[in-house]
Image (spheres, rainbow, N blue to C red):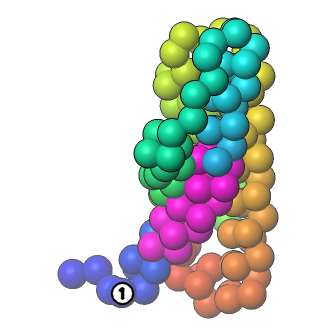
Amino acid sequence: MPSRAAFAPWFSGAVLGAIVGTAFLGIGGRAAMRGIAIVQGAATGFSFGGSLTVVFLGAAAGVAAGLIYVASVKLAGNRMWRARLLFALVVLAITIRGLRPLDALRLALFLPLFAAYGIVFDRLWARRSTSAPEQSKKLHAA
């Protein structure tokens, strides 16, 4: 059975992903959806339940992306540029696959949110890793 330390980076990635995802993918995603409605001249309705669903889905997407980040770090070893590139390519592919319909407006509104998510997540992860070097060692050992 894997040790508790082996699960620590995965748990940290999921929690950090949920927090950053709530802000950028959830709240930012809701704002982007509002922007699309305004640009297209659609009725811009607002419901608490609908907005809460979008924020929750942003948090869930953040968890998934956080786990992809941890997997990328594990696959790339100590080469963080490779881990970041792998993470960016996988998240970009998933993002493009999820945008329906795929058009310039959606790309212009949603891709910066995922880029901001990735940059902020990476910086917070690096800060977490440098403040707890033993956690970083565990990540690469597990």
Residue 45, position as x, y percentages in the image: 58, 28
The 10 Å Cα crowd at callout 1, few under 14, some 14 to 19, many 20 or more, is: few
In the image, residue 58 above or below residue 14: above
In the image, residue 58 above or below residue 67: above
Where is residue 49, by image quadrant?
top left
Where is residue 113, by image quadrant?
top right
Q: Residue shown at 33%/86% (left/top)?
A: 3
Q: What quarter of the picture does the C terminus occupy?
A: bottom left
- Residue type at the position of mark 1: Arg
Main SS, magenta residues: helix
SS under mark 1 = helix
Q: How many marks?
A: 1
In the image, residue 120 above or below residue 110: below
- Whether residue 61 is visible to the viewer of this picture, yes or no, is no
Query: In the image, which residues are magenta?
Result: 11-26
Question: Does the magenta run of residues contain 21?
Answer: yes
Q: Residue shown at 77%/22% (left/top)?
A: 108
Question: Does the magenta run of residues contain 7?
Answer: no
Disc 1: which residue = 4
In the image, residue 17 above or below residue 53: below
Q: Residue shown at 60%/54% (left/top)?
A: 21
Residue 82, position as x, y percentages in the image: 69, 48
Along the line of sight, which residue is nearer the eye, 7 or 59?
59
Tell whether 50 sits left or right of 24: left
Q: What quarter of the picture does the N terminus occupy?
A: bottom left
Residue 65, position as x, y percentages in the image: 53, 50
Q: Residue shown at 36%/87% (left/top)?
A: 4
- Whether residue 25 is visible to the viewer of this picture, yes or no, is yes
